[in-house]
Image (cartoon, rainbow, N blue to C red):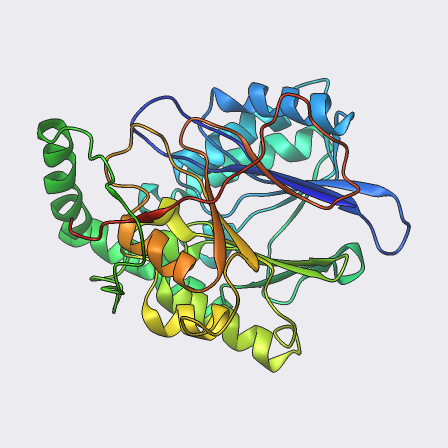
Amino acid sequence: MYEVDFWNVSITAKSGDAISLRFTDPRTQNPVVVVIDGGYKDFGDTLAGKVETYYGTKEIDLAISTHPDADHINGLRQLIERPDVQVRELLIHRPSSRGFKGDAVCAGLVDELVSMAQKEGTVVTEPEQGLERFGGALTVVGPTESFYREMLQAQVDEEKTGALGKLLRPVQTAAKQIAKKIRKVVGSDPGETLSDDDGGTYPRNNTSVVSLFRFDDRRLLFTADAGVPALQFAQDFMDANGLSGEPLNFVQIPHHGSRHNVDVDWLNRVLGTPGSVAAESRTAFVSASDQDEHHPNSVVLNAFKRRGCKLGSTEGSNIRYHSNDAPPRKDYDKLDSLPWYSEDE
């Protein structure tokens, strides 16, 4: 039995990630609960309620903090510090353990969360590539240690040069001036326009923990906000360690469906070329606010659909991927795949 929930994190124009899984531990045949990120601060309490309501427990076997962006990490603090919730283990990278300090890498924020978790009795572990839990049902497949350090240094360099601020300011200004973009539905595949990752994503996103879950003959890949270099390194690890021989059944679309986190080479490598697999033979979910004018990008959605994925997006709803023997939910409707969209953006 397994069920994967992508929770609708935000009602604002800012997207975020909060994901939970419940599945049968292949060693013990007992159910385990895993949380991947917790959304914004105010969502931590909501997430605790969702886990109790749908999984029937206040115990979380493992929480994964993929990277220290507010829309991923802040809800975890609220979740962990609740006196009625027990989080047994937290996986989180610590920049300070590698000599990186300061706000550029969010070292203080991370250390504060670690300290608080330890006071609550939570075991804290750094998610090194190759780390396994639940008898191999979970394997951390990225980032590599060397690439993680490289991305930490890139964040420090950006702070020194002011490059990050220069990159962010135009985006923030434009967001105030442009009305919400409405994706235009088309009746058939408009043809692929995706090629590269359009300049790539920020270094902090590329520090994201990438995790592979394997249970019930399923392979599920969770990418957080990782960009193409991080995702390629993760695939290299899977190829080298016999973790990529079976079909990928489920994949998280990176970074809320951003145009800057995927390219054709990675998609073809992890999902196959267009037409190589049957339509809706696998599933891809994306976390995005229904008020976010930039996410998910139509070009990205079509690229996943083109490679056999049934698409689901939070955008105002909670969505679930589950086995046939998972408990039914009367308050959930059947999830229909997203349609094709015009790529004229």
Residue at 54%, 37% (x, y): give it.
Answer: 335
Q: Quadrant of residue 214?
A: bottom right
Using the image as rendered, state which of residue 8 and residue 118 is in the foreground.
8
The reply, left or right, for residue 30 in relation to residue 106 is right
Using the image as rendered, state which of residue 77 and residue 108 is in the foreground.
77
Residue at 23%, 35% (x, y): give it.
Answer: 293
Residue at 33%, 41% (x, y): give it.
Answer: 103
Q: Give x and y (percent) for residue 36.
A: 57, 42
Using the image as rendered, state which of residue 138 and residue 216 is in the foreground.
216
Q: Give x and y (percent) for residue 340.
A: 33, 50
The reply, left or right, for residue 255 in relation to residue 220 is left
Q: Give x and y (percent) for residue 299.
A: 27, 55
Q: Give x and y (percent) for residue 312.
A: 48, 43
Residue 234 appearing in the image: yes
**Can you name the residue that lies furthest to the bottom here?**
240
Residue at 34%, 62% (x, y): give it.
Answer: 262
The reply, left or right, for residue 14 in relation to residue 119 is left
